[in-house]
Amino acid sequence: MRVPPRFRIFVDVAMTSFMVCAFAFRITGDFAHEWIGLCAVFAFIVHNAINLTWYARTFSGRYNARWVITLLVNTTLALSALIMLITGLMNSRHVLAFLELSGGMELRQLHTSAAYWLFVLVSIHLGMHWDGVLAMCRIKGRKPIIVADILSLILAAGGAYFFVERDMFSKLFLGYSFDFWDPSRPPSLFFFAYVCMIVLIAFIVRIVLKFCSWLKKR
C-alpha cells in the first residue's frame, strides 16, 4: 500500500516533536513527560510500519559502505528506542503506577542516556535521508534548495552553540544525564535549542555524504 507523502511528513514531524517535548520534562512535569513519551513511541511504531519496504530490501541489492552505515544507524537507533521504552516503563510513576515497578536511579540514568543517543541517531537518520525529505516537502529547483541550505546552515550554527551549552557530551556518555532548565529562561528557547541541534547533526551528516559522493565520482 502506497502511503501519501503528506502523511509520511506528518508522522515524522509528530515523532520528532514528541521526542523534543519529551526532553522538556523539567518544563512539562513527569506526568506529561510519560504520556508524551508514549506518543513518541507510538509515532515511532507508525513510522516503521509505513517504511516496511526498507526492511524487505535490507538484504537485497549492493552491500556497499552506505548500506553498512544505514544498517548500523537504524539498528542502534532501534536498540536505543527499545532501551528507552523498557527503562521508561520501569520508571513509570503515573501511567503504570498501579504496577508499582521498582525503577531506580540507575535505570533512570540509563533511560535518559538512551534517549539522548536516540536523539543523535534520529538526527543522523534525518541527515542520511535529507534529499528525500526535501522531495516529500516538494522543495525543488536550485533557488529553493539554496534557501533551504542557508536556513539549515543558520540553524546548525545555533545548534553548535546549544550542543556545548546543553553539555550534550556528558549526557551522551553518562557523565551527567539529567537535564536542567533555568525557569527564568523562556521555554520556547529550550525547544528551539533542540531543533537547532537536530539540524546541526543532520546538516553535518548530509555534508559528509555529499563529500563522500564527490570523492567517489573523482
Image (tube, rainbow, N blue to C red):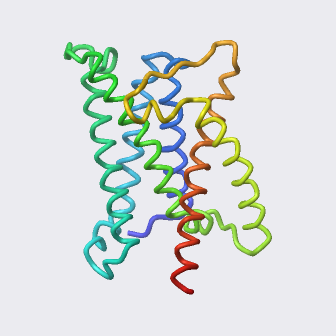
User: Hey, which residue is sitting farthest bottom in the picture?
Assistant: 218
The image position of residue 48, as x and y in percent, is: 36, 55
Tell me: 78 left or right of 119.
left
Q: In terms of depth relative to the viewer, which is nearer, 160 or 91?
A: 160
Q: Residue at x 57, y 63 (%)?
A: 206
Q: From the viewer's perspective, is residue 202 above or below residue 216? A: above
Q: Residue at x 39, y 60 (%)?
A: 50
Q: Taking the image as drawn, is residue 7 in sight?
A: no
Q: In terms of depth relative to the viewer, which is nearer, 158 or 82?
A: 158
How many marks overall?
0
Q: In which quadrant is the C terminus drawn?
A: bottom right
Residue 5: name its quadrant.
bottom right
Q: Residue at x 29, y 66 (%)?
A: 55
Q: Residue at x 43, y 69 (%)?
A: 2
Q: From the viewer's perspective, is residue 19 above or below residue 66? A: above
The image position of residue 199, as x and y in percent, is: 61, 49
Residue 100: name its quadrant.
top left
The image position of residue 142, as x and y in percent, is: 76, 74
